Amino acid sequence: MGVGFWAGALLLACETAFLVTSGASLWSSSPAYLAPSPAEVALRHTVGSALVGMGTSTCFTAGQVGVVPDVNVAFGIREFAAYDPLLPHAYSPTWPDETGQPPRRRPPPTAPFSVFCPAVTSAPMARRYGIGFVLEPPGVPGPAGLTFVRSIDGETLYRVPGASLATLVPAPSGLLPAIDAPGRPVAVGHPDPASWKLVTASTGRAVLRLHLTDVPGWHATVDGRPLALQRYAGVMLQAELPPGRHTVELHYWPAAFTLGLELAAAGLLVLVAVPLAVGLRRRHRPGPSEPLSSGKGPGPRLHS
């Protein structure tokens, strides 16, 4: 056995050890899907598809408010918090620039490095980011301007008046309105997870503000024509619309995904073409020349 064999065996052993140790905490897990608690069911039923913010930043602490970031996805609850190494870098500097607050308060030593878990401390701040509800720990009053909804497992839920996933803001001068300029909520439809559809109506020029993270890959149309998207509040999207009634659609399809499909197709083509080419070459290759004599009799005569 050569060096290549032992190198492969060593790599296999290292990979096996890594998988065993990294998955050790999952050995006692149940094969059943996560079951929400009664409090989580009540929260989902109350807020629906609205975005839920935390009035006090408590992520990954003993007093965690709401659902631990990323686990909330399994329960169908949208939270203004994330635990994701792929979170756009703009979130970290933009939040303090826009609100004057850190993106996470008093992070515990055990908290993951890629956590965005801000405290939503005012109604204008909540409306700016499309946050429809705010949760507070037991005994902590909600920010001014919010409406009490109910208590859930000791935590207090407040509604943010005027909050919406999309807002149509008048812009009669043709200039972009102030960052917290009031507007009219616009209903958002989701034909699929990578699409938004909205219908707007205005008597003058307006700006459609979308509480949707500005990541590469979002494309918009208005009445079937391309619509230019601009950045709003450092991390979200907005677009200018002319007067009248319009249908705005957004679709997520990043260029990197198209490139990946093209590379995959090219790789598949190579995997199919190479064996075919080798087979055809072998089929048409001339065989070895027959000997002039087999040694068992007179060989064939040669004639000039």
Image: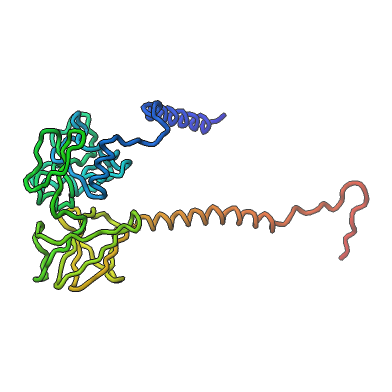
What's the colour scheme? rainbow
Question: What residue lies at 18% left-to-right and 52% top-to-bottom?
Answer: 130
Foreground residue among 32 and 120: 32
Question: What residue lies at 23% left-to-right and 46% top-to-bottom?
Answer: 47
Q: Position of residue 103 (x, y in %)?
A: 15, 42
Question: What residue lies at 19% left-to-right and 58% top-to-bottom?
Answer: 231
Q: Quadrant of the C terminus?
A: bottom right
Disc tally is 0
Judged left or right of residue 278, residue 294 is right
Foreground residue among 123 and 209: 123
Judged left or right of residue 194, residue 100 is left
The residue lying furthest to the right in this view is: 297
Judged left or right of residue 257, residue 245 is left
Q: Position of residue 106 (x, y in %)?
A: 13, 33
Q: Position of residue 76 (x, y in %)?
A: 30, 44
Q: In the picture shown, does residue 174 fall above or below 261? A: below
Q: Quadrant of the N terminus?
A: top right
Classify residue 121 by image quadrant.
top left
Q: In the picture shown, does residue 247 fall above or below 100? A: below
Classify residue 286 by image quadrant.
bottom right
Classify residue 54 by image quadrant.
top left
The residue lying furthest to the left in this view is: 144
Foreground residue among 217 and 58: 58
Judged left or right of residue 113, residue 291 is right
Q: In the picture shown, does residue 293 fall above or below 62? A: below
Q: Position of residue 59 (x, y in %)?
A: 20, 35
